[in-house]
């Protein structure tokens, strides 16, 4: 039996939903469609990226076997995008697997994501 569910949102736990929504707005260009002290949503398409406040949230480490998921994005220019994202508060871990096929970054709260050339 298959449920045939439709994915509507990817929600990340965090300490500051509004701040993280602004960061991902700059990364994706997606419109912030909702924002309050407890949650924020990006995107007007069939899938939204959202953030929910969790008291005492601590982001995952890297490399860390406790990391459960990450987001992948493509960009026109990886070097330029990396510089811009670092200026917005991202960090670039020393450990960079993939032999240069992608760049691993962490958002301001430590959620990992990768950028690769489009």
Image (cartoon, rainbow, N blue to C red):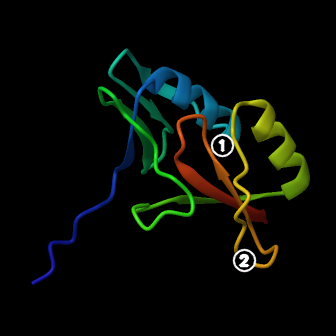
Residue 68 vs 25, above or below: the answer is: below
View extreme (left): residue = 1
| Labelled disc at residue 103 | none
Badge count: 2
**Residue ranking furthest to the bottom:** 1
Q: Could you tell me which secondary element the residue under label 1 belongs to?
A: helix
Residue drawn where x is 72% and y is 77% of the image: 98
Q: In which quarter of the image is the N terminus?
A: bottom left
Q: Locate residue 6, reporting x and y percent.
A: 29, 61
Q: In this view, does 8 lie above or below 43?
A: below
Left or right: 78 as drawn, with respect to 10 = right
Rendering coords of residue 64 (x, y %): 49, 63
Q: Dot 2: within a 10 Å radius of its alpha carbon, few (fewer than 14), some, or many (20 or more) residues?
A: few
Identify the residue position indicated by label 2 in the image: 98
Kindly identify the residue that appears in the image at 44 percent across and 44 percent down: 48
Indicate the position of residue 106 as horizontal and vertical percent values.
Answer: 62, 47
- In percent of the image, x 74 and y 58: which residue is there? 94
- Which residue lies under the disc numbered 1? 28
Picture layout, residue 50 above or below residue 68: above
Q: Residue at x 53, y 30 (%)?
A: 21
Q: Distance between the residues labelled 2 and 1?
A: 23 Å
Residue 77 visible in image: no
Asked whether, in this view, residue 2 is left or right of residue 101, the answer is left
């Amino acid at each position: 039996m298959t449920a045939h569910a439709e994915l509507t949102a990817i929600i990340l736990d965090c300490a500051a939903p509004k701040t993280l929504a602004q960061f991902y707005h700059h990364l994706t260009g997606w419109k912030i469609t909702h924002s309050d002290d407890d949650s924020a949503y990006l995107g007007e398409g069939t899938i939204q990226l959202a953030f929910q406040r969790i008291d005492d949230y601590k982001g995952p480490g890297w490399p860390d076997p406790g990391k459960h998921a990450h987001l992948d994005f493509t960009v026109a220019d990886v070097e330029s995008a990396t510089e811009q994202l670092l200026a917005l508060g991202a960090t670039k871990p020393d450990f960079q697997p993939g032999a240069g096929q992608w760049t691993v970054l962490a958002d301001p709260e430590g959620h990992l994501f990768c950028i690769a050339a489009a």
